[in-house]
Image (tube, rainbow, N blue to C red):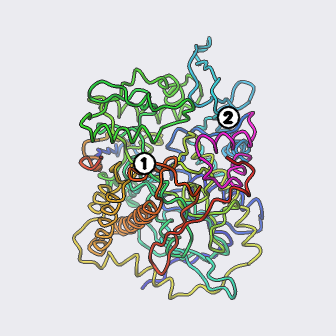
């Protein structure tokens, strides 16, 4: 076998979207003498989700971290939070926007005086200024506010990192981590193996510390989240890392089979086929964002024969807000974002034929366990961004985006800014590892390249279609029941045995198989953890256990026990935290 | 599948569309210095290639009806 490229670095960052760039920049700034390398499957500065969303970032504004945390614990996270990480996140939100502003050379929208132009989520339109800008009544109960970032910002952030001396390796997808047996403290992560997505050439990276910032798992169901295929999660599992909150993954957006674009605020204007508004009665006084109860109501209505369900957009009170923030200059000045959203909305809504809505699985399976310093359970391995949102336990009993819009970029920037200095500190302390074995590299190549030798006729996209049939149904992934989950898990096991039947003709398809394998592992972790949580708590809802368990809040931890997915309970140490119920 | 059209006269070979694609739909022909629309059936119509093209040489026309989605497995 051809020996591929070899690269030794002090800190290796896997993933070059905003979390990875934030980690790389802050690692380099923490210790400019260290060599920091970003390896990205596509092209850093363009890749990932953080430049294809709203470009909205959450900050606290005038609110205090304690105020934010208390609101969040009470109304969203329901005390299933790691309060240490939650408070750290809150206290770094304002400076996160300032960091993006600095790195991007001024891409955060500002008013005439140079201050960030903020707009609170779900404010009500009350009029217009002389220059046409919308005026909103911002008297809403949420203790945070939002800034808007121009959507081409990440290219500038990449340039900033380059100027600091960060190295970039683009179009190399990392498929596994390398570990070494340190004398006393067990295995340590000492690098990674990747392959060029165009040529298939192997790349071996040795590093003193690795930061995984390569996204979560969205099972490729909803279009704009398609890049999140869980390969980093699977690599961390094989290396022996610990996971948490696997069962809190299934974020759904309201969407349409006509175009798959999302409809925010549907719960205010959701009608069954008999003409009854079935969303509004379930909206509580404090309703920060999309509600799991209303999604479950969709299921109940369809099962009761009251479907399909309809979305009467003209009754959605959020519409003036949403149309002003996205694809419009009514609030912010972001020509690039206006064009991006204008294209999306035009393409989607010009092809809408009816008002039927369905829940589309976004997924956001993000369980890589990290402590408040973004260190995983494996020495030498750190994480940032979407891969560890759930695993950080900062947000509690809720699916990402945590019922606070603008949290994607906010958490990615926060966790990157924590992981970077943590990884740099570790790298400086331990120095470069030397024990990486060629045998391990060979095993990775053998596994990754096996589909090229397979005579199987199955194609990766056919497998993706089968996996989606298990994950998309709301009755499997959100409104859960033991019977349905056991059937889903059995189908996942069946599909796992079909993996060797997938053949690959080129590097693109080789990655397709690696992604399918990661999707199935994530599905298994998801259903196995979900079966163990025998209660309903926040975004985790079971038909067969409709109430919270009397034993109090606990996290479910998933670990790799000799290749199998093992689930155990960990009590939430509420008494050690500042805020009690 | 999505129809992704490249105007080869307008295209100046800058590679931006190839870099812009976040899921490897667009490959690059080094000799012709032009994009190759290798996996249009996987396109999720994010339009990032089109929006980033300074020459306006690439156009994505989505076809939502063929988009991979488990239409019969929703409930």
Does A184 sit left or right of A299 as displayed? right
Residue A206 is drawn in which quadrant? bottom right
| A68 inside magenta stretch | yes
**Mark 1 vs mark 2: in front:** 2
Chain ID of residue with mark 2: A
- Which residue is denoted by mark 2 in the rendering? A143
| A188 inside magenta stretch | no
- SS at badge 1: strand
The magenta segment:
A62-91
Count the marks.
Answer: 2
- Which residue is denoted by mark 1 in the rendering? A362
Q: Nearer the viewer, residue A157 or A527?
A: A527
Report the Cα–Cα distance between label 1 and label 2: 26 Å
Percent x, y for residue A21?
Answer: 63, 55
Percent x, y for residue A177?
Answer: 54, 74
Q: Residue at x 55, y 50 (%)?
A: A397
Callouts 1 and 2 in the same chain? yes
Percent x, y for residue B37?
Answer: 33, 53
The answer to whether the residue labelled 1 contacts the one labelled 2, judged by CB atoms less than 8 Å apart, is: no
């Amino acid at each position: 076998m051809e020996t591929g490229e070899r690269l030794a670095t002090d800190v290796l960052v896997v993933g070059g979207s905003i979390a990875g760039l934030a980690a790389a920049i802050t690692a380099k700034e923490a210790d400019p003498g260290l060599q920091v390398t970003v390896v990205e499957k596509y092209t850093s500065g363009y890749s990932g989700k953080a430049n294809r969303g709203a470009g909205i970032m959450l900050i606290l504004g005038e609110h205090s971290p304690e105020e934010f945390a208390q609101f969040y614990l009470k109304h969203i996270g329901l005390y299933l939070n790691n309060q240490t990480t939650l408070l750290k996140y809150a206290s770094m939100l304002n400076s996160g926007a300032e960091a993006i502003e600095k790195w991007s050379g001024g891409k955060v929208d500002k008013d005439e005086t140079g201050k960030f132009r903020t707009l609170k989520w779900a404010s009500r339109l009350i009029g217009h200024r002389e220059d046409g800008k919308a005026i909103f009544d911002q008297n809403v109960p949420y203790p945070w506010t939002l800034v808007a970032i121009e959507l081409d910002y990440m290219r500038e952030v990449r340039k900033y990192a380059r100027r600091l001396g960060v190295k970039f390796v683009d179009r190399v997808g990392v498929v596994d981590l390398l570990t070494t047996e340190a004398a006393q403290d067990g295995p340590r992560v000492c690098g990674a193996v990747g392959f060029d997505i165009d040529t298939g050439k192997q790349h071996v990276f040795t590093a003193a510390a690795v930061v995984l910032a390569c996204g979560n798992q969205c099972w490729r169901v909803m279009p704009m989240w398609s890049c999140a295929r869980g390969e980093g999660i699977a690599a961390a599992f094989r290396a022996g890392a610990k996971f948490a909150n696997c069962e809190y993954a299934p974020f759904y957006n309201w969407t349409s089979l006509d175009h798959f674009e999302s409809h925010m605020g549907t719960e205010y204007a959701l009608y069954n086929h008999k003409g009854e508004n079935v969303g509004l009665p379930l909206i509580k006084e404090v309703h920060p964002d999309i509600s799991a109860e209303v999604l479950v109501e969709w299921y109940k209505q369809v099962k009761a024969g009251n479907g399909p369900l309809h979305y009467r957009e003209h009754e959605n009170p959020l519409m003036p807000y949403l149309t002003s923030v996205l694809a419009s200059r009514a609030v912010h000045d972001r020509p690039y974002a206006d064009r991006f959203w204008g294209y999306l909305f035009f393409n989607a809504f010009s092809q809408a034929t009816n008002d039927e809505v369905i829940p589309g699985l976004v997924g956001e399976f993000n369980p890589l366990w990290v402590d408040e310093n973004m260190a995983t359970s494996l020495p030498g391995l750190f994480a940032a961004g979407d891969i560890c949102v759930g695993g950080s336990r900062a947000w509690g009993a809720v699916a990402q985006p945590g019922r606070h819009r603008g949290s994607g970029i906010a958490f990615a920037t926060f966790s990157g800014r924590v992981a970077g200095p943590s990884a740099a500190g570790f790298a400086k302390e331990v120095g470069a590892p030397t024990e990486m074995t060629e045998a391990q590299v060979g095993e990775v190549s053998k596994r990754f390249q096996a589909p090229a030798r397979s005579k199987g006729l199955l194609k990766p996209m056919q497998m993706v279609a089968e996996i989606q049939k298990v994950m998309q149904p709301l009755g499997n992934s959100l409104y859960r029941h033991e019977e349905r989950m056991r059937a889903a898990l059995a189908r996942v096991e069946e599909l796992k045995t079909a993996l060797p039947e997938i053949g690959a003709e080129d590097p693109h398809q080789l990655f397709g198989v690696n992604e399918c394998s990661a999707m199935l592992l994530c599905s298994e972790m998801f259903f196995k953890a979900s079966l163990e949580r025998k209660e309903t708590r926040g975004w985790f809802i079971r038909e067969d256990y409709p109430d919270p368990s009397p034993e109090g809040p606990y996290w479910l931890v998933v670990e790799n026990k000799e290749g199998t997915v093992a689930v155990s309970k960990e009590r939430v140490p509420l008494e050690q935290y500042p805020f009690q119920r | 599948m999505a129809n992704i059209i490249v105007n080869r006269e307008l295209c100046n070979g800058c590679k931006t569309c190839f870099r812009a694609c976040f899921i490897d739909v667009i490959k690059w022909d080094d000799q012709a210095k032009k994009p190759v629309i290798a996996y249009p059936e996987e396109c999720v119509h994010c339009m990032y290639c089109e929006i980033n093209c300074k020459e306006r040489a690439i156009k994505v026309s989505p076809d939502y009806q063929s988009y991979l989605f488990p239409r019969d497995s929703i409930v």
